[in-house]
Amino acid sequence: MTAVADSSKNTTKRATGPVVDFADLMQCPVARKPFEHFDKIDELRETDDIHFGDASGHPFWAVTAMEPIREALQNPQLFSSTAVLPDTPEPPYLWIPEMLDAPKHNKWRKLLGPLFSPGAVEALEPKIRERFGVIIDEVAPRGECDFVQDVALKFPNQIFMDIMGMPITDADQFQEWETAILHEGSSASGRALEAMGGVHAYFTDVIAQRREDPRSDIISKALSWTIDGEPISNDDMMAFCLLMFMAGLDTVATQLTYSFQHLATHDEDRRRINEDPSLIGPAMEEFMRYYAFVTPGRKVMQDTCLAGVDVKAGEMVWLPIVAANRDEGEFPNANEVIIDRAENRHIAFGAGPHRCLGAHLARLEMNVAMEEWHKRVPNYRIDTSIPIREHGGQIGLSNLPLVWDV
Ligand code: HEM
């Protein structure tokens, strides 16, 4: 039974039994119909603000309203980032800075902040536009593409290679690894493990090279830092590179794919942004609100009350951001995509100390992609002869077959 706050007596309750199966909700097989994950989270949100569940034998709470999601994200003393997946409350791995708590987290953020500031990101714009230009030059004359493989993954991958100081010729290899790790089923599958091994070996080499021969990229800069008087260890550097790999590539690709899926199926919205490109900025914000695919978790550090229920130290809370972003109490007509929505205080980039470090970069990449694509291919539609699949884990569309007239 779902846990319910008994507001009449101003007391809290515990749920009496598991209802939410995390594996069913998130770690579904590769082939699923589009929007299935969002639909399931919507169903939960419509019944209550918090739900008890089981994640491979571990108790967890699925939180599905803005206020308690924000509360958990903004209160790291009670809700720690040392574990971020409900089925892994004692993770045998570390991602930096994502899985650090204060004070170490603040130290990393202070060092990383300037590299992702609005000014630093602005300086990258010409390169970002040039990279997208080459991609669209290749794709536009074809009249068809799988938007995921041919555009959405390729583009942030190339920018990632640039900022990490890695050769663009290795971008395709990274795209293959990324697809195997995040889009092809369980993270424990043979292909995913093999790909993770490949990424690990690649970064081991790059870190060693940059120690020998520092350049102007993020890895070289980070290797010159000290935290508490100690240089950054190879293990911490690896934990940072792995997080950058997971946070910086697939996120932009996924957001772009949902946005283009929307525009390909909503002629009026597409017409409006073609007629008035200044709508692209607000439209992207609305796509980020509505198609918010990041689902962070936190570990409860002390018994406390969240959304009217008692949560116990050691349990996990799961915070699907889309549930906050579709909360009717926060957004009028929350279930509608309104591309010029007036007030849009979504939390697609998170909230609190772990709010997305790459938010400026992500926004720039997505706006450039939208602008440059629509200059070349203003009208396009879905090729309905090819089924669209959605993957869980990190939610996203696995393919998006688009066609247009040439
Ligand atoms: C549409 C694209 C993106 C979305 C929706 C997104 C969303 C998020 C969210 C929700 C978090 C917080 C997770 C949590 O609280 O546990 C986060 C953290 C982070 N993101 Fe992004 N992100 C995007 C793109 C990027 C890009 C392009 C980069 C860098 C190249 C990046 C780097 C990071 C890093 C390093 C963190 C960890 C911050 C910390 O723990 O202090 N993200 N992102």
Image: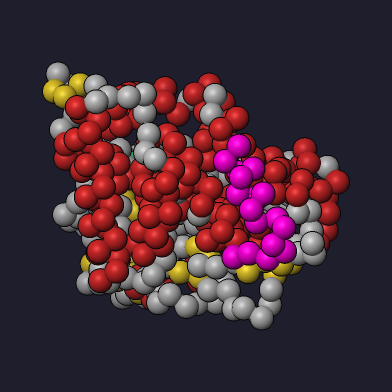
Main secondary structure of the magenta stretch: helix
Which one is nearer the viewer's eye here, 201 or 275?
201
x 39%, y 48%: residue: 170
x 24%, y 21%: residue: 224
Which one is nearer the viewer's eye here, 307 or 176?
176
x 44%, y 36%: residue: 162
* Residue 363 picture quarter: top right
Q: Looking at this rendering, what residue extends furthest in the top direction?
A: 229
Is residue 132 rendered to the left or right of residue 305?
A: right
Image quarter for ligand 1 equals top left
Which one is nearer the viewer's eye here, 64 or 396?
396
Which region of the structure is painted magenta? 130-146
Reply above or below: 357 against 176. Answer: above
The image shows a total of numbered marks equal to 0
* Residue 341 picture quarter: top right
Residue 36 visible: no
Reply above or below: 53 against 263. Answer: below
Is residue 310 rendered to the left or right of residue 62?
A: left
Tell me residue 127's x, y (percent). Answer: 56, 32
Tell me residue 204's x, y (percent). Answer: 20, 43
Q: Quadrant of the N terminus?
A: bottom left
Residue 369 on the magenta span:
no
Residue 142 on the magenta span:
yes
Is residue 184 rendered to the left or right of residue 232?
A: right
Q: Looking at this rendering, what residue extends furthest in the right direction?
A: 275
x 78%, y 41%: residue: 277
Tell me residue 55's x, y (percent). Answer: 29, 69
